[in-house]
Amino acid sequence: MEFSDKYMSLKREELMQKVQMQMSERRFIHVLGVEESAVALAAKYGYSQEKASIAALTHDYAKERPDDEFRLIIERDGYNPELLEYGNAIWHGLVGADMVERELGITDEDILTAIRLHTTGAAEMSLLDKIIYVADYIEPNRKFPGVKEARELALIDLDEAVAYETKHTLQHLIDQEQKIYPKTIETYNRWVVNNQ
């Protein structure tokens, strides 16, 4: 898929190169899988495949940056200091979106919001937010119990796929006794509890 200059000045090859330089080969393979899933979901649900592609390619742009770099940006740029209590799993989306904007020149708010929310979800999610959230979970390289069901659900009902993913992610975090980011609870309450 070729990109227009509607959302950024980079050509597809340039964006791919810049993204690839920021991550390991394993992570880049994941990103390509997310793009494949996101473009398919965008086609299925009538959304811009170009925007879905750009958001998918950049969603993990900051994933492998050092924690110290995140802490510095959180303190310097006026983020809520409570964010420091969480780690990369949360930071690479929230703070990573700002890195994407600053370093790649992508200013489209829909794309940046989808990057911000791709690990936590939110009570209010746009179609693109849901596409990236779900695509990240179901991409072809993922192998975990329940991923097949998640893939099938994603093709039938995107909201149900959001609920399924949120419920299973939350259960995993509880099983691991990890601190849960408040937005993840909001996502659960909205998409799992209120969706029944």
Image: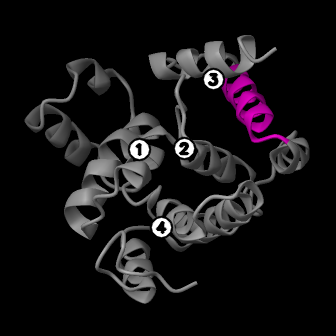
Task: Say which of marks 1 and 3 sits in front.
Answer: 1
Cα separation, mark 1 vs mark 3, equals 23 Å
Direction from residue 185 to residue 104 in the image, left or right: left
Crowd around label 2: few <14 · some 14–19 · many ≥20 (10 Å): many
The mark nearer the N terminus, 1 or 3, is: 1
Instruction: Name the colour scheme.
Output: one colour
Few, some or many residues within 10 Å of mark 3 (<14, 14–19, 20+): few
Amino acid type at mark 2: Asp
The residue where tag 3 is placed is 173
Quick one: label 3 or label 2, which is nearer the N terminus?
2
Q: Amino acid at mark 4?
A: Ile
Label 1 close to label 3 by CB (< 8 Å): no
From the image, tell me which residue sits under label 4: 54
Q: Give the residue number, with chain letter if any, for mark 2.
A: 129
> Going 67% across and 53% down the picture, which residue do you hit?
135
Please tell me whether residue 80 is drawn above or below residue 164 in the rendered image.
above
Q: Which of the two discs, 3 and 4, labels the residue nearer the N terminus? A: 4
* Residue holding disc 1: 113
Q: Residue furthest front?
A: 46
Range shown magenta: 157-172
Q: Earlier in the sequence, mark 2 or mark 1?
A: 1
